[in-house]
């Protein structure tokens, strides 16, 4: 069985997370993704540790686990693109590729003859995706962009964290590089759209992806709320600006989440909690009223939720179709029966590291399922094989190695 994108070849010149995440998704869907890395050093995230991946003997290796999260199912070729012969090799690869991914600074590849215009002249069908912090245009275009900076500049941190005045109050970044991840997902969608258009037009195109654009777009309801009212939304911790109760609550042994989305669910919760009078109270009878009287309601609910353990609440509320759940550590996540049933963790064999753990692609396709072909590669692991596919013989490859080109 072949993958949905098994007919597509991707040349991945990107590093860190947004580009590699897009490339891994395309690879999971079957594309042949060739990752071009700097000889000796490779992708920066190979060295972003600890934590480090363990080798076959259970000892810490020199490969950061960060790299392993975004590079499976790819082949790695090490090429020094600062050398003319290295640039020529990349051009040969691009001439045979369907997609090229890169996240160099704006104009950074032009001096090597590897920019979109140069490569499109060789391969007019090439879909060329550039990922930068701020895009190819605008006053910030020359700047480098990192996820943390964009979470702040793009408004995400202004709505994340406890309110000012509360313990631990103040802006807070999300616990994963969410802007990078979302940019990778938007980039892969854009690439698939460009490939679909190419089926009709025969032409590739340049995709301009910016972390800041993605972050602004993903403010979603918060952005539209601001545009509709002119008001800046406040940080609410784990609470929701438009739904109450929809946040974390204390229990007898920890915390739980209540995600009550309608009045019927609120009535059933109050009945189970032994406080049906709350649902009948005019201040709390509708969601709009509960949002307005949030400060009065939440302390009353907190006093109720402290009376039982998290497990007791979840069992009781699930039986009454009231959305709720625990706040898991990652140990709890990967021990969860549903996560295990969905096959979200697996391992792949690695030449130096033994079996390396992976988090599965969440896409479930019935006819062309994701195939986990190989582990994230070592630097230049597939250099010889890829060069042979270009028609180079052993002597030519040895000469390139001697000059440090590969």
Image (cartoon, helix red, strand yellow):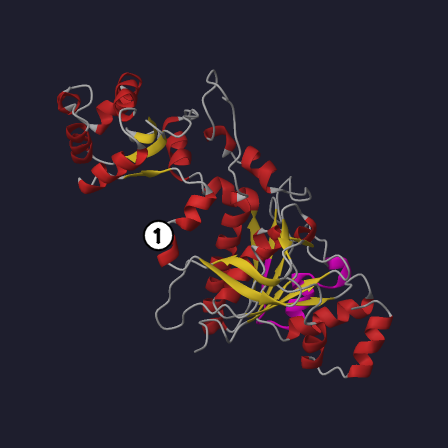
Q: Nearer the viewer, residue 340 or 98?
A: 340
What residue is rendered at 22% in x and 37% in y? 317
Q: Secondary structure at mark 1?
A: helix
Q: Nearer the viewer, residue 302 or 281?
A: 302
Q: Is residue 102 rendered magenta in the image? A: no
In the visual, does 312 lie left or right of 107?
Answer: left
Is residue 122 in sight in this rendering?
A: no
What residue is rendered at 82% in x and 64% in y? 83
Q: Which residue is mark 1?
A: 337
Task: Name the image quarter holding residue 79.
Answer: bottom right
- Count residues near mark 1 (Cα–Cα under 10 Å), then give few for <14, some for 14-19, many for 20+: few
The C terminus sits in image quarter: bottom right
Q: Nearer the viewer, residue 54 or 192?
A: 54
Task: Name the image quarter holding residue 53.
Answer: bottom right
Residue 137: x and y in percent read: 62, 46
Magenta residues, start to end: 110-129
The N terminus sits in image quarter: bottom left
Task: Name the image quarter holding residue 220.
Answer: top left
């Amino acid at each position: 069985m072949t993958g949905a994108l098994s007919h597509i070849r991707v040349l991945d010149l990107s590093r860190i997370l947004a580009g590699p995440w897009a490339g891994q998704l395309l690879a999971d869907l079957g594309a042949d993704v060739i990752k071009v890395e700097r000889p000796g050093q490779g992708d920066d995230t190979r060295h972003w540790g600890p934590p480090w991946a363990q080798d076959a003997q259970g000892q810490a290796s020199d490969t950061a686990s960060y790299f392993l999260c975004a590079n499976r199912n790819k082949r790695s070729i090490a090429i020094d693109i600062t050398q003319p012969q290295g640039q020529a090799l990349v051009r040969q690869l691009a001439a045979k590729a369907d997609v090229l991914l890169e996240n160099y600074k704006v104009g950074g590849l032009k001096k090597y003859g590897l920019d979109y215009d140069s490569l499109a002249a060789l391969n007019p069908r090439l879909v060329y995706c550039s990922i930068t912090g701020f895009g190819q245009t605008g006053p910030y275009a020359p700047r480098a962009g990192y996820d943390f900076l964009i979470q702040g500049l793009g408004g995400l941190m202004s709505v994340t964290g406890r309110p000012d005045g509360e313990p631990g109050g103040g802006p807070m970044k999300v616990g994963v590089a969410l802007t990078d991840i979302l940019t990778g997902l938007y980039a892969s969608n854009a690439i698939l759209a460009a490939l679909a258009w190419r089926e009709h037009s025969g032409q590739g195109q340049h995709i301009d992806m910016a972390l800041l654009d993605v972050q602004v777009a993903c403010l979603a309801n918060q952005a539209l709320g601001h545009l509709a009212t002119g008001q800046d939304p406040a940080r609410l911790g784990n609470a929701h600006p438009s739904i109450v109760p929809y946040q974390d609550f204390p229990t007898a042994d920890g915390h739980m989440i209540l995600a009550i989305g309608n009045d019927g669910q609120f009535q059933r919760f109050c009945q189970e909690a032994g406080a049906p009078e709350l649902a009948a109270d005019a201040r709390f009878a509708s969601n709009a009223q509960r949002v307005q009287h949030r400060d009065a309601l939440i302390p009353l609910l907190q006093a109720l939720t402290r009376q039982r353990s998290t497990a007791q609440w979840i069992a009781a509320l699930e039986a009454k179709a009231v959305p709720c759940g625990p706040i898991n550590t990652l140990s709890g996540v990967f021990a969860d029966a549903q996560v295990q049933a969905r096959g979200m963790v697996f391992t792949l064999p690695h030449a130096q590291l033994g079996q390396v753990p992976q988090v599965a692609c969440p896409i479930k396709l019935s006819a062309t399922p994701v195939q986990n072909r190989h582990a994230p590669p070592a630097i230049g692991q597939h250099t010889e094989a890829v060069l042979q596919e270009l028609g180079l013989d052993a002597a030519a490859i040895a000469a390139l190695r001697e000059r440090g080109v590969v």
